[in-house]
Amino acid sequence: MFTSLLLNFCLLITSTFAISLTYRAGEARQRAVMMVVRLALTAGATLLLAMASAEVPGGLRIDLRYVPVVMVVLRYGPLWGALVAAPMLLWRLVFDTDSGVDGVVWLHFASVLALSTLVRPAARPLLQGLQPRLLWLTPVPFLGVGVGVLLVPESRELFWVSYPVRLLLGALGLISAVSILQSRLQLLRLTQVLADQANTDALTSLPNRRAFDRDLGALRCGEHLALLDLDHFKAVNDRYGHDGGDRALAQVAGLLRSFAPGRVRAYRVGGEEFAALIGGMDSVQAAGVVERLRSALPGQQGGWLAERGERMTVSIGLATRQADEDGAALFRRADEALYLAKMNGRDRVVVWAPGQGAPEGALPPPGAAPPTETLQPRHSAWRALRTTVTLLAQRRVLRDEDWAEMLRLAVEAVDGACCGTLDVRLRGDRFRLVAEVGYAPDLVGLPLTEASQQRWYGRPLDEWRAGTPRLVEGEALDAAYATSDAHLDSPEVRQLNLSGRRREVTGNLCLPVVLGGEVVAHLNLDRLQGAPPFGPESVEVAQLFAQQIAALLHLQGRWDELEHLVSLHERVSVVSPQELAPELTAAAAELLRAQWAVLLRYDAAQDALVSDGRGVHEPALGPVRLPRGVGLAWAALQAGEVIRLTDLSAEPRLYFREQLRAGAMMVVPLRAAGGEPLGALILTRQAERAFSEADAHLALLLGSLAARLLERDHHLVGLQATLDAALETLGVAVELRDFETQDHTRRVTALAVTFAAALGLPPEAARGLRQGAALHDIGKLAVPDAVLLKPGALDSAERALIETHAERGAALSARIPFLHPDARGVIRSHHERWDGGGYPDRLSGERIPLAARLFALCDVYDALVSDRPYRAALSPEEALQILARGRGTQFDPELTDRFLALHARGAFAHVAPERVNADRPTPA
């Protein structure tokens, strides 16, 4: 019985939770339908509870079937409660085989219905919230449930047991069900509050920009959007502070809220800007409504504005949604109309009528004469200026989407323009198409050449470099296409033919964008069939955009330079001295868009400026050497300032005249803090792209960085040489304890360095190998003289002690600061074997450090060809045979082959051991 009652209680909880999920936010339009659904679910829950009841003797059942009935009666009334209970009663009367309890069933149902109705006025607040003072009402509806047991003789003795259980279960079930429903409803209320807060402006209580964007997307064709901007609102803030401005905004919001309710929905979209969505009227009526709104604001009676004698005016832009137009396009048209109102005197309404390309005019203030001139300038031009200022203020590298927005505004603003492209110069004579409007997106990123752009322009070069606008139409357009394509690769031509809509274009307006005397971009605006022709006004507006693009490219150039300098500093801070010159040269060529660049470094031994031959020049010039006083580099160093030349052909101090030929040059001196020469940076360009004063300033920044890096390089080279000398001295000192290996360290180091150079090891790896070779036997300092200097054969214990020198050497080397990590690998692992039979770690194969594998060959070879007290030196041929026999067992097979091949070519001939056996001192 207990299990059945627990199951019944769980069914009640589950059913109530399922019914609670039917409550959702914003269901006002479907309230009646949802009520029917909930009543049906409740009836089903009642039936389910009855079917899963616990049976007691006499054919009676104990369950929670009446809890849903009580809740329905308390919420909707006894009629709905009886309706919900009907399926349960029908099942009980039809399918129950014991007809003797029918009267009990009807008695229980009637008592629940009557008592619930009786306490409904007092208990109904329970559905809104469980209040402790009302909990005594929860068992009242169930007082009659169980009394019917007294009518069944065989069950009367169960009354005093079953009745309290029924009463307690009913009360607990009602409390639980009400708690579940209340939790769900409370969650929905909180969600709605948060949604309202998220979509409501806290200051004005109007819907905010989020709500506006949502509702704008749902605006139907033929409905209207009005954008409102308070005139001279900054002056109100300046006079009365932000608190006064807030009061003024709240008063304006109150006017908007009361204006044509039901047909005008007002929003605050930001700052002093408001919006209104207008429905239920045509465009003429909508224009009249917003005009009355504009007129009502200055004359508004009462309120904070009137108390201070302030007369607030508003400018309004109105647009009607057209077919197949999205909300963003409608907003742009209304926004343009608004700014036309602002730019033409304020306190007016400008209407952008459906089907037209521009605002049809303005409704002037009452009593004012109608405007007699066209509303100018176009807002797209002003919006572009605002976009330019915003991008300039952001101080960042511009992206393709920034250029696309600027181009889109240009196409909108220039009469006759239907589509267009914008390409920007990269380094040298290459351009990149960065934005398109009206064409396929795959045009973005298309590479173009300077020659093709000059042919596309089709006018004299001096006009191109001056930025003179060029207009071509008709047959001249086809000729421009043909001459331009001849200077492009086939893939670019195919892409332009496929995506460039050339058959539809009837006219092109091209504006070279000039910065510092150099064409840095091309703004191309195209006219399609049916569009009006380009006129003088079109050219004038397009030139405004070209100027703004030039300003943005100037900013882009400065940020590019800053990013390059930061990146260069990060890179060269960790490069080796050998990599410093190529890094500086490449960075200078890219930053200053140079055709040729070379870094000359001062060599004190030669007293000359020299290069490593890796400058940026095509064809390569090879190594450069300028003795003191020769060439422009020494002239710049002696003068201590940048030299700029616009024409090299007439310069008598020019070096490499035949290779450099004509062009422009800039020479940047690199001097130490004390004035000593460090080098010079030389860059050239084509003669028509001479270096400017701004280029010289940038070159000085780069030169200052280069000079500091060269000073650091010289200092580090000196420190490294001192460290290497100290390590070699320490290695020789170790060697002096072992008379039989005198001069071994010098020879084996020379062998290893030569081997590493032949293998092409990087300079840093070669430095680690050299240090490791110098100290490879430092662990022998920990070996007693009696063992180290023993003239005869070593026993097993002595051999084991000797073999500890590699591990002890690694421990000693760990205490040496600035020692290269590869050197420690050589010291510890140079006695490891390829087959894993070495010591101290029994490493095998490529687990042995490369430097240790390489050094092992050199170490064993020198030991074989040197005299020892227990044998004479072997010949090189005999030593090489022993190395070959150890290939793949003791030594790395590939390195062994390389060593043997190098020896055969005489690569190690300069390293010859001295025969020391004859005069070797005898150990004491």
Image (spheres, grey):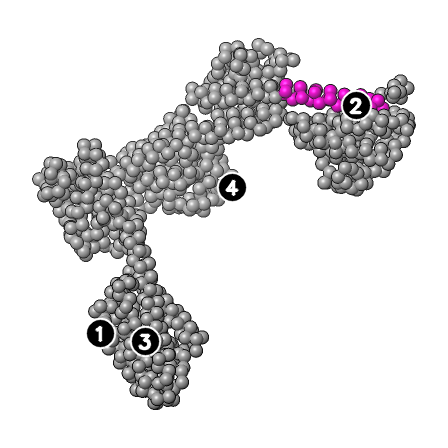
Q: Position of residue 810 (x, y in %)?
A: 72, 31
Q: Is residue 720 magenta?
A: yes
Q: Earlier in the sequence, mark 2 or mark 3?
A: 3
> Where does label 2 land, which residue?
735
Q: Earlier in the sequence, mark 4 or mark 2?
A: 4
Q: Secondary structure at mark 4?
A: helix
x 37%, y 71%: residue: 12
Mark pair 3, 4: CA separation: 85 Å
> Where does label 1 land, which residue?
118
The relative height of residue 281 versus residue 156 in the rendered view (above or below) is above
> Where does label 3 land, which residue?
66
Q: Residues within 10 Å of mark 1 (few under 14, many from 20)?
A: some
Give left or right: position of 21 versus 732.
Answer: left
Callout in the foreground (1, 4) = 1
Q: Give the residue type at disc 3.
A: Tyr
Asked if the residue at tag 4 contacts the one at tag 3, i.e. Cβ–Cβ closer than 8 Å, the answer is no
Callout in the foreground (2, 3) = 3
Q: Give the residue type at disc 1.
A: Leu
> Where does label 4 land, which residue?
490
Q: Position of residue 185 (x, y in %)?
A: 31, 61
Q: Secondary structure at mark 2?
A: helix
x 20%, y 55%: residue: 279
Q: Quadrant of residue 551?
A: top left
Q: Residues within 10 Å of mark 2 (few under 14, many from 20)?
A: many
Asked if the residue at tag 4 contacts the one at tag 1, i.e. Cβ–Cβ closer than 8 Å, the answer is no
Image quadrant occupied by the N terminus: bottom left
What are the residue bounds of the magenta stretch? 717-744
Q: Main secondary structure of the magenta part?
A: helix
